Image: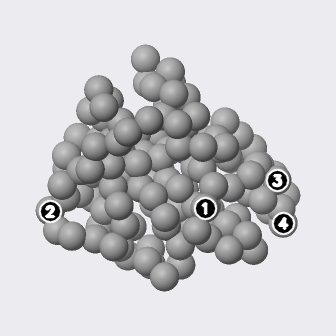
Amino acid sequence: MQYVPINLSKQYNLPVSAPPGQDSTAIIQGFDASHGFGEMREILTDLMHMGKHNVIIDLSHCPPETKRITMAYLEGLVVTPGFNAMYTGVSEREAATGFGNLDQVFNGKIEPTIDHAVRRIELRSD
């Protein structure tokens, strides 16, 4: 699927795009620790001001050993302003490892590809 770049209030080091025809959804690709959570917070604030309610965050660039803690922190960033979030580039097993019942927090929020997440988030938004 082709995605349309989103013009945010300033240039960030992460590509942000949207699926055609889904005005309330944004896709943030390639997040890893080098980008920092401050940059992600700014991007999410921009998206919130633009009226986006759904966000898909790709974690395929994160090292496997950091994915679960990264997801936990990102979940805090997206839940507070009320985003409906999905994650790609991480398995359910990676997300749950070492967190006891945290697998329940991410249940239904992980998809194998961005295209799968776009279809799933569209269904959840109806």
Answer with mark 3 or mark 1, whichever residue precedes in sequence. Answer: 1
From mark 2 to mark 3, how far is it between C-alphas?
A: 36 Å
Where disc 3 sits, the SS reads helix
From the viewer's perspective, is the residue at label 4 or at label 3 nearer? Answer: 3
Q: Position of residue 40 (x, y in %)?
A: 39, 67
Answer with mark 1 or mark 4, whichever residue precedes in sequence. Answer: 1
From the viewer's perspective, is the residue at label 1 or at label 4 nearer? Answer: 1
> Any mark on residue 60, and which?
1
Where disc 1 sits, the SS reads loop
Extreme bottom residue here?
34
Name the residue that disc number 2 marks: 9
Front one among 28 and 50: 28
Name the residue that disc number 3 marks: 93
**Amino acid marked by disc 3:** Arg
Front one among 59 and 108: 59
From mark 2 to mark 1, how far is it between C-alphas?
A: 25 Å
Front one among 57 and 97: 57
Identify the residue at image location x=45%, y=58%.
29
From the viewer's perspective, is the residue at label 3 or at label 1 nearer? Answer: 1
From mark 4 to mark 3, how far is it between C-alphas?
A: 10 Å
From mark 1 to mark 4, how far is it between C-alphas?
A: 19 Å
From the viewer's perspective, is the residue at label 4 or at label 2 nearer? Answer: 2
Is 98 positioned to the left or the right of 86 in the image? right
Quadrant of res 109: top right
Name the residue that disc number 4 marks: 98
From mark 3 to mark 1, how far is it between C-alphas?
A: 14 Å
Q: Callout 3: few (<14), some (14-19), or many (20+) C-alpha neighbours within 10 Å? A: few
**Amino acid marked by disc 4:** Gly
